[in-house]
Image: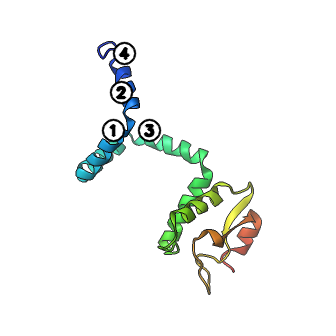
């Protein structure tokens, strides 16, 4: 066992690894008791580490193109009020999987468009399909 004075950082790391659950509970309690303080801390951290966070986010987006697309489509659907409140977490995860597993050269298409001329569909798993990119562009917002 390491002595505290010998290697302070390693001792702290070992202690954390042995007591992860305790640390998580403490963090959750702290956040719930002092939400304003936590928001302020996070805001200052983002300001201080802007470039680092930007580089991290860019690298993450490059590793996860399907998720990036899923998140942007989810945002668009929310803006259009096309994600129903009754949609389960499991269905939301299915949507993310559909975007993540999209074959190369294909788009994820809404069978009934979110913003069609005469009809508007929902952002739900059973309204999504894979279409070749060229076909999807040609289809546009038509049903």
Calculate the distance from the C-alpha at mark 3 to the C-alpha at mark 2: 28 Å
**Crowd class of label 4 (few under 14; some 14 to 19; many from 20; radius 10 Å):** few
- Where is mark 2, residue-wise? 15
- Where is mark 3, residue-wise? 52
Q: Residue at x 74, y 54 (%)?
A: 104
**Crowd class of label 3 (few under 14; some 14 to 19; many from 20; radius 10 Å):** few
Nearest-to-viewer mark from 4 and 3: 4
Cβ atoms at labels 4 and 3 below 8 Å apart: no
Calculate the distance from the C-alpha at mark 2 to the C-alpha at mark 4: 10 Å
**Mark closest to the chain's N terminus, 4 or 3:** 4
Residue 20 at x, y percent in the picture: 38, 36
Residue 49 at x, y percent in the picture: 38, 39
In the displayed structure, 117 sits above or below 75; it is below
**Mark closest to the chain's N terminus, 3 or 1:** 1
- Where is mark 1, residue-wise? 22
Nearest-to-viewer mark from 3 and 2: 2
**Mark closest to the chain's N terminus, 1 or 4:** 4
**Crowd class of label 1 (few under 14; some 14 to 19; many from 20; radius 10 Å):** few
- Quadrant of the image for the N terminus? top left
Label 4: which secondary element: loop
């Amino acid at each position: 066992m390491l002595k505290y004075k010998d290697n302070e950082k390693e001792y702290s790391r070992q202690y954390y690894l042995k007591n992860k659950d305790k640390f998580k509970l403490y963090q959750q309690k702290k956040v719930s008791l002092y939400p304003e303080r936590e928001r302020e801390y996070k805001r200052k951290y983002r300001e201080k580490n802007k470039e680092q966070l930007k580089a991290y986010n860019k690298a993450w987006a490059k590793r996860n193109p399907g998720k990036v697309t899923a998140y942007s489509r989810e945002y668009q659907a929310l803006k259009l009020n096309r994600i129903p409140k009754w949609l389960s977490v499991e269905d939301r995860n299915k949507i993310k999987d559909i975007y993540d597993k999209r074959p190369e050269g294909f788009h994820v298409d809404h069978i009934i468009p979110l913003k069609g001329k005469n009809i508007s569909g929902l952002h739900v798993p059973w309204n999504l399909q894979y279409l070749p990119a060229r076909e999807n562009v040609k289809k546009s917002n038509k049903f």
